[in-house]
Amino acid sequence: MDETGILFPLVEAPAEAVPLPDASFDLAISEYGASLWADPARWLPEAARLLRPGGRLIFLTNSVLAYLCSPDEGKIVDRLVRDQFGMYRITWPGEEGVEYHLSHGDWIVRLRASGFAVEALRELQAPPDATAHPYYDWVRPEWARRWPAEEIWVARKRAV
């Protein structure tokens, strides 16, 4: 507040139960937060509750193909190693957390059931000059130039 004079309150809460009133926002964004680590059956209805009619939900997550090409251990490979049907709640060997991976069709069904209309799905491609990240190294730039490693979903809350 010192630099701008703007009071900007922050709320820390689980994405499935945000302690704010209905229709509090025009825009909600999740960059690998709720969209990967919270159950879509719970966080999507909560996002819809928090958004005003016409509000936008934008979220980033791993691509379906990246998940399907991810072995239990090690880096992503250039072949399918998982089934697409039945994917949802995923636990990785040796990891404590849970991830949620849905097919495109399942995302659309869940978004619509929560009152959203899908406006866009963008599958990201690594640029020609991309280099490997020292920490996020599970997908190589060479792989991500051929196939999408990440997706951006854009949905709008339908007017009641």
Image (cartoon, rainbow, N blue to C red):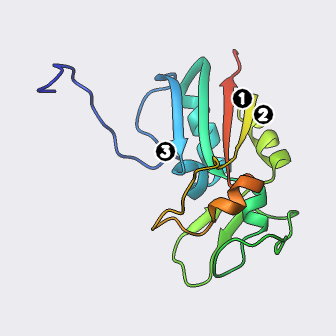
User: Label 3, label 1: how many angstroms apart (C-alpha)?
Assistant: 19 Å
Q: What numbered label is drawn on residue 75? A: none
Q: Is residue 147 visible?
A: no
Amino acid type, label 2: Arg
Query: Residue 149's image quarter?
Result: bottom right
Q: Nearer the viewer, mark 2 or mark 3?
A: 2
Task: Decide: few, some or many residues near mark 3? Use Cα within 10 Å; few <14, some 14-19, many ≥20.
Answer: few
The residue sitting at 84% across, 71% down in the picture is 79
- Percent x, y of residue 22: 50, 25
What residue would you read off at disc 3? 17
Instruction: Report the number of discs.
Output: 3
User: Label 1, label 2: how many angstroms apart (C-alpha)?
Assistant: 5 Å
Image quadrant holding the N terminus, namely: top left
Q: Is residue 73 left or right of residue 123?
A: left
Q: Is residue 23 left or right of residue 142?
A: left
Q: Nearer the viewer, mark 3 or mark 1?
A: 1
Dot 2 or dot 3: first in sequence order is 3
**Which SS class for mark 1?**
strand
User: Label 2, label 3: how many angstroms apart (C-alpha)?
Assistant: 20 Å
- Percent x, y of residue 142: 68, 61
- Percent x, y of residue 84: 85, 63
For residue 145, above or below residue 77: above
Amino acid type, label 1: Phe
Amino acid type, label 3: Ala
What residue would you read off at disc 2? 112
The residue sitting at 55% across, 25% down in the picture is 51
Residues marked 2 and 3 touching at CB (< 8 Å): no
Residues marked 1 and 2 touching at CB (< 8 Å): yes
